[in-house]
Image (cartoon, grey):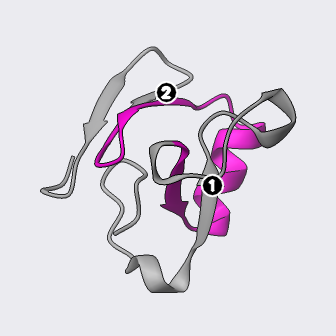
Amino acid sequence: MDSFPFGTRDARTMDLDHTIPHQHGGATSADNLSPLTRHHHRAKTYGGWAKRQPDPDTVVWHSPHGWIYLVTPQGT
């Protein structure tokens, strides 16, 4: 499932995004990858969204407006 808040797309149709970019030392492993659509990847890269991944099944998003979203396999 898409790891962006309220995402509904199936992960098989998306790209795996590095939480910590590879060029900043982020490993290519389950602890540092989450599925995102291209649109959501652009929101993260250029739109002011940020994410943390405390474990492989949990992504914490910070919106450009200060909102915090917790995304797990159960949803947002």
Is residue 54 left or right of 62 when viewed as pictured? Answer: left
Residue with the mark numbered 2: 63
Q: Where, quadrant-wise, is the N terminus in this rendering?
A: bottom left
Of residues 20 and 2, which is closer to you in this image?
A: 20
Q: CA distance from mark 2 to mark 1?
A: 17 Å
Q: Which residues are magenta?
A: 32-59
Of residues 8 and 56, which is closer to you in this image?
A: 56
**x and y, in percent, of residue 11 in the image:** 43, 76
Q: Determine whether 65 is above or below 27 in the image.
A: above
**x and y, in percent, of residue 23 in the image:** 87, 36
Q: In the image as oriented, which residue stretches furthest toward the bottom?
A: 13
Q: How many marks?
A: 2
Q: Determine whether 20 is above or below 3 in the image.
A: above
Is 47 colored magenta in this rendering? Answer: yes
**x and y, in percent, of residue 64 in the image:** 57, 23
Residue with the mark numbered 1: 17
Q: Which callout, 2 or 1, points to the residue nearer the camera?
A: 1
